[in-house]
């Protein structure tokens, strides 16, 4: 029979994403529901090493479900990558009486949690929080839906300017290794072309697409580009390339940057965070460890952490086809 857990720690690590606060709230209140103590660990693994802990109760997490970012803060921790750093973290958890961890973050955060469990047998459950939606074992990561809505809203505004001035806008969105934001937001905002890391569409295809748009009477165009696109040129080099081939185009660049990671989480992300937090705590109480809780076919399911870290998310081929058809 598994040991009865009396105190759970929760931390956010890696890049922030909308919905993290809602997930912390869910973890804290699920602990309270089951009469377990909950400790917030500030600044991720670095805070664990420095003993930056605070007891959290149901009223500690009032009015945060609607806030972006993470009130527990996030930080990179080089020290946690060392055995000495992890030993300090373990000693602090033992001293505080924390017996299990809920880690909200991405694959780097999960890797740290898995290593920590391997060395100390410390129960760890992961909640996927990243706007890139690039974690295996869940159809949606926390913050992804909010980021999509933010990007679509901004592109809608840019399109007003593009059509008023007959301009071509190259809009760079986040997605170093994954084009989920670019593909979905591009379709949602009616982009003429979408460039993503998973598909090396090449520069010639972009030129052909722009020629076709021009010939069918389009006087302005929106091209959405994931920051990790494999054309081999950054967005400003791409602008120069397009202008050298289409001098008649007035080409502008807009890099959306970190605005995509901020803002109040969407209803979808708030509900998802609430569901994931409940499942994370209850999975610990069932005596399980080294799992990530995720959304699969609209059900909250468990994926082994190692699989979540090593697995690769696939781009939706049907969406690529839809994108091609819509850009005619």
Image: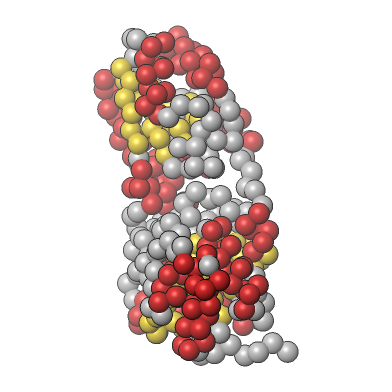
Position of 293 compared to 265: left or right?
right
Q: Looking at the image, which residue is at 40% across and 35% down?
A: 172
Position of 297 compared to 141: left or right?
right
Q: Looking at the image, which residue is at 65% across and 89% down?
A: 3
- Using the image, determine if residue 10 lies above or below residue 262: below
- Using the image, determine if residue 256 lies above or below residue 58: above
**Residue occupying the far right of the picture:** 1
Which quadrant of the figure has residue 250? Answer: top left
Q: Position of residue 275 (x, y in %)?
A: 53, 68
- Using the image, determine if residue 53 lies above or below residue 203: below
Q: Position of residue 28 (x, y in %)?
A: 45, 79
Q: Looking at the image, which residue is at 49% across and 42% down?
A: 176
Q: Looking at the image, which residue is at 32% across and 72% down?
A: 63
Which quadrant of the figure has residue 14? Answer: bottom left
Say which of 304 and 156 sits in front. 304
Q: Position of residue 196 (x, y in %)?
A: 53, 34
Asked whether residue 187 is in view, the answer is no
Which quadrant of the figure has residue 301? Answer: bottom right
Asked whether residue 201 is in view, the answer is yes
Quadrant in which the N terminus is drawn? bottom right
Position of 258 compared to 187: left or right?
left
Q: Position of residue 322 (x, y in %)?
A: 58, 31
């Amino acid at each position: 029979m598994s040991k009865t857990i009396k105190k759970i720690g929760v931390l956010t690590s890696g890049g922030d994403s909308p919905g993290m606060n809602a997930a912390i709230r869910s973890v804290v209140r699920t602990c309270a529901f089951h009469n377990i103590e909950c400790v917030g660990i500030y600044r991720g693994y670095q805070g664990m090493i420095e003993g930056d802990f605070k007891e959290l109760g149901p009223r500690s997490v009032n009015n945060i479900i609607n806030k972006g970012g993470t009130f527990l803060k996030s930080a990179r921790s080089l020290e946690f990558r060392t055995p000495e750093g992890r030993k300090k973290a373990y000693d602090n958890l033992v001293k505080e009486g924390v017996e299990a961890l809920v880690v909200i973050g991405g694959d780097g955060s999960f890797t740290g949690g898995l290593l920590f469990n391997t060395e100390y047998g410390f129960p760890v459950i992961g909640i996927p929080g990243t706007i890139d939606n690039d974690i295996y074992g869940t159809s949606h990561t926390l913050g992804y839906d909010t980021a999509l809505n933010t990007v679509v809203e901004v592109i809608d505004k840019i399109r007003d300017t593009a059509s008023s001035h007959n301009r071509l806008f190259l809009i760079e969105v986040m997605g170093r290794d994954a084009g989920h934001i670019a593909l979905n937001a591009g379709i949602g905002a009616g982009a003429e072309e979408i460039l993503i890391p998973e598909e090396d569409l090449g520069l010639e295809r972009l030129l052909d697409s722009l020629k076709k748009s021009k010939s069918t009477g389009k006087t302005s165009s929106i091209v959405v580009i994931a920051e990790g696109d494999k054309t081999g040129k950054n967005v400003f080099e791409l602008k120069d390339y397009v202008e050298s081939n289409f001098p008649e185009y007035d080409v502008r660049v807009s890099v959306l940057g970190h605005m995509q990671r901020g803002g109040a989480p969407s209803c979808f992300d708030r509900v998802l965070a609430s569901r994931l937090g409940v499942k994370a705590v209850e999975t610990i109480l069932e005596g399980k460890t080294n799992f990530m809780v995720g959304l699969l076919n609209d059900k909250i399911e468990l994926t082994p952490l190692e699989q979540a870290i090593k697995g690769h998310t696939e781009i939706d081929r049907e969406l690529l086809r839809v994108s091609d058809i819509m850009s005619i």
